[in-house]
């Protein structure tokens, strides 16, 4: 795993400083590749590539990058892993290609020479973001893996085309100080992340998963293509559904997942796995241990707050599977000390509070291993989120109400201030004591239902409302117009069998790559740890879209087919429990140890001076939360992470100190 960056000047003098600038851009990514650095430039073509290396395969100098192809035509800077590189190597050797080392980057370049850039990508099974310079045609190709495990940003700045693994690399280009995109900011306030292709900066984009971008050195133009499409994968799955028995489905899923785990266990460095004790991570670890001659190293973070602690469950699974298990119990101070560093780590506003424990477990694992597998993506592929069940229930309950009536009813309910709802519920409680337990939560649910009704009640609008933080973000972000996403653009979604499939699809192309995978990538890369996700093997993703819903949701259980695989390795009693999630008690912290920090960032005068957000709704939600009338931690965390990011990144680029080594507090117990 590595960090990549580069420049292509399509007009204007290239200058002899080009390689030095690329080196500076690469230096911003040193955390992603702490083992070595390299640059390559062709001043006559105006191109320079930078690379920061985290050595995983072929630790010798034969694996150093940027790397030239055997013919000299192609040069690449490559971030990621090609898991089937051994099979591709054999095929290429039969075609007469000779190899110097045993790494996957050399195989990638040979594949490009043999089959072209698109043909090489279509044959590759892996996670990656890469740049390939074609010296003969003077074309720069950028590509990203099919699902979006590895990040890649790009854009034009004053005649130069820039790209990099993180935005901080682009900002290291001299004078690069792009404006904030208010439209993307509104999207962020709705979801807590910025969905591709948008970024927080106007003029800079994220390359879409499965994307192939080609830029010409002769003129300022680029063409974007897709070598793999999630829309097409879902469409093909719906057109040719799996027709076998339940037992045959379980066998096929297990065979593919077992192979996906096997090829992700290849490394020339120590390897382990994150283990929460849930269905997904337990299945991955079980298949790892069943294919390993050694005890697999597993890692878990525990919190003293029972509602957020999964360490005990993970410990039981680890004991049953016989892994070499490490757990670390942390108190609030261990997570809180990370908060000031989050804007630098995540590089653009990002508000999934599980980023904190993800960083902590990554740091724990990095003490012993350089690669760690995880169980991410089971929820999106196999109907795992609780909101799917809730959304389906709401949808069914609203069927009998005409849409016009829904909108009118929603507007009427929203016209009633929340304090009035609470006053009514308080009065009912006094008249009928003991019958209105949890009335604060009921008031909030009534408010959410009113938002759903006002939206008109279409399936897409209903789900979008349920998963939104700020329901009307353009009322918060000044001068913003929310851009389209797969939630709102019907052309971005395939024709699927039903609402459940659509919810999984839209999460798979938005929440998964732009929240879950961003969280894991930045957390692991911040400490030089490579994360691998077996459930995102594209062969398994394509099979999942062929499986009928009944193989995912059955008898009140989610992830039915995954559970059948896991039960072959772990007793049901160890894993059958309500889904907990991987979070921290942000709500309580904002009323306690984080209160002063939050009130400083959300100071009315500061918000007004910055000019991006309307202070009134922010201050209203802060007051409501601090009074404990409502838990508005998700809404506030989105604003706080933007304000903290703004303070970190506003103004010209400046030298930034390297992160200090982290040690747990004295209260942490292993």
Image: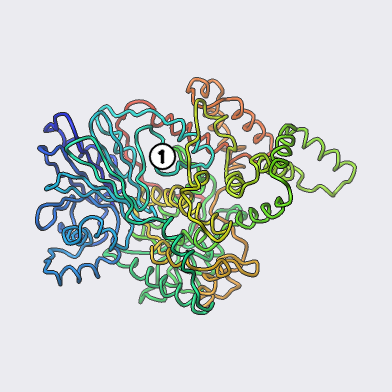
Residue appearing at x 85%, y 49% in the figure: 434
Q: How is the image coloured?
A: rainbow
Q: Is residue 432 left or right of residue 9?
A: right
Point out the residue furthest to the right here: 431
Q: At which x and y percent is residue 238?
A: 49, 64
What residue do we see at 45% from left, 42% from top?
338
At x 41% / y 54%, what residue is drawn? 362
Q: Quadrant of the N terminus?
A: bottom left
Tell which of 665 and 298 is nearer to you. 298
Residue 665 seen from this side: no
Instruction: Judge from the rendering whether residue 310 lies leftward or rightward of residue 98; answer left or right.
Output: right
Q: Residue at label 1?
A: 198
Considering the numbered disc 1 on the image, is that residue within a helix, a strand or a loop? loop
Instruction: State the image coordinates of residue 166 (x, y, percent, origin top left).
Output: 33, 42
Q: Residue at x 33, y 52 (%)?
A: 226
* Coordinates of residue 408 in the picture (x, y in percent): 72, 37
Q: Could you tell whether 657 is left or right of 378 in the image?
A: left
Q: Is residue 42 visible?
A: yes
Q: Is residue 319 above or below residue 9?
A: below
Q: Nearer the viewer, residue 631 or 7?
A: 7
Placement of 266 over or under 129, stated as above or below: below
* Residue 549, image quadrant: bottom right
Q: Position of residue 115 (x, y in %)?
A: 20, 61
Q: Residues within 10 Å of mark 1 (few under 14, many from 20)?
A: many
Q: Is 144 left, or right, of 93 in this rendering? A: right
Q: Between residue 537 and residue 413, name the one nearer to us.
A: 413
Image label count: 1
Determine whether 144 is above or below 612 in the image: below
């Amino acid at each position: 795993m590595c960090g990549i960056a580069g420049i292509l000047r399509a007009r204007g003098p290239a200058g002899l400083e080009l390689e030095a600038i690329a080196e500076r851009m690469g230096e911003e990514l040193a955390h992603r590749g702490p083992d070595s650095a390299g640059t390559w430039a062709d001043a006559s073509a105006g191109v320079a590539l930078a690379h920061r290396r985290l050595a995983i395969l072929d630790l010798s100098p034969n694996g150093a990058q940027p790397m030239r192809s055997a013919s000299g035509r192609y040069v690449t800077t490559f971030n990621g892993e090609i898991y089937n590189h051994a099979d591709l190597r054999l095929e290429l050797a039969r075609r007469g290609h000779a190899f110097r080392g045993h790494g996957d980057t050399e195989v990638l370049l040979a594949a490009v020479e043999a089959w072209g850039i698109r043909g090489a990508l279509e044959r590759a099974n892996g996670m990656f973001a890469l740049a390939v310079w074609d010296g003969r045609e003077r074309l720069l190709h950028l590509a990203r893996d099919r699902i979006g495990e590895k990040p890649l940003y790009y854009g034009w700045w004053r005649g130069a085309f820039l790209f990099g693994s993180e935005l901080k690399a682009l900002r290291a280009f001299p004078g690069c100080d792009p404006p904030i995109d208010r439209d993307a900011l509104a999207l962020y306030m709705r979801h807590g992340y910025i969905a591709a292709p948008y970024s927080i900066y106007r003029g800079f984009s994220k390359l879409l998963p499965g994307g192939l971008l080609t830029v010409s050195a002769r003129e300022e133009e680029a063409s974007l293509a897709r070598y793999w499409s999630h829309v097409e994968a879902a469409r093909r799955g719906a057109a040719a559904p799996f027709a076998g028995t339940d037992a045959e489905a379980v066998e096929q899923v297990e065979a593919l997942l077992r192979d996906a785990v096997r090829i992700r266990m290849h490394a020339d460095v120590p390897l382990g796995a994150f283990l929460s004790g849930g269905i997904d991570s337990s299945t991955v670890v079980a298949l790892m241990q069943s294919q390993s001659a050694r005890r697999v190293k597993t890692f878990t973070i525990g919190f003293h707050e029972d509602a957020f602690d999964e360490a005990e469950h993970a410990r039981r699974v680890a004991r049953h599977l016989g892994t070499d298990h490490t757990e670390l119990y942390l108190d609030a101070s261990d997570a809180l000390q990370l908060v000031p560093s989050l804007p630098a780590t995540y590089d653009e506003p990002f508000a999934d509070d599980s980023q904190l424990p993800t960083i902590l477990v990554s740091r724990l694992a990095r003490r012993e291993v350089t690669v760690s597998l995880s169980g991410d993506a089971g929820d999106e592929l196999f109907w795992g989120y609780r909101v799917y069940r809730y959304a389906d229930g709401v949808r069914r309950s609203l069927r009998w109400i005409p849409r016009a009536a829904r909108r009118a009813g929603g507007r009427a309910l929203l016209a009633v201030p929340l304090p009035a709802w609470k006053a009514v519920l308080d009065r009912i409680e006094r008249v009928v004591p003991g019958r209105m337990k949890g009335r604060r939560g009921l008031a909030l649910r009534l408010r959410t239902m009113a938002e759903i009704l006002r939206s008109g009640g279409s399936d897409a609008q209903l789900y979008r409302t349920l998963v939104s933080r700020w329901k009307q973000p353009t009322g918060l972000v000044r001068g913003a117009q929310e851009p389209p996403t797969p939630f709102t653009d019907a052309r971005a979604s395939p024709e699927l069998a039903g609402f459940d499939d659509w919810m999984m699809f839209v999460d798979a192309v938005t929440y998964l790559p732009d929240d879950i995978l961003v969280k894991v990538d930045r957390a692991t890369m911040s400490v030089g740890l490579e994360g691998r996700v077996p459930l995102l093997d594209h062969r398994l993703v394509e099979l999942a879209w062929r499986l009928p819903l009944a193989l995912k949701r059955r008898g009140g259980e989610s992830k039915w087919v995954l559970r059948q695989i896991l039960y072959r390795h772990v007793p049901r009693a160890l894993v059958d429990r309500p889904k907990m999630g991987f979070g921290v008690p942000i709500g309580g912290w904002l009323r306690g140890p984080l209160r002063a920090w939050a009130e400083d960032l959300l100071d009315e005068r500061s918000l007004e001076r910055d000019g991006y957000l309307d202070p009134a709704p922010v201050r209203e939600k802060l007051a409501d939360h601090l009074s404990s009338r409502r838990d508005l931690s998700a809404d506030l965390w989105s604003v706080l992470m933007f304000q903290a990011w703004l303070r970190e990144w506003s103004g010209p680029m400046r030298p930034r100190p390297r992160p200090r080594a982290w040690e747990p507090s004295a209260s942490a117990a292993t």
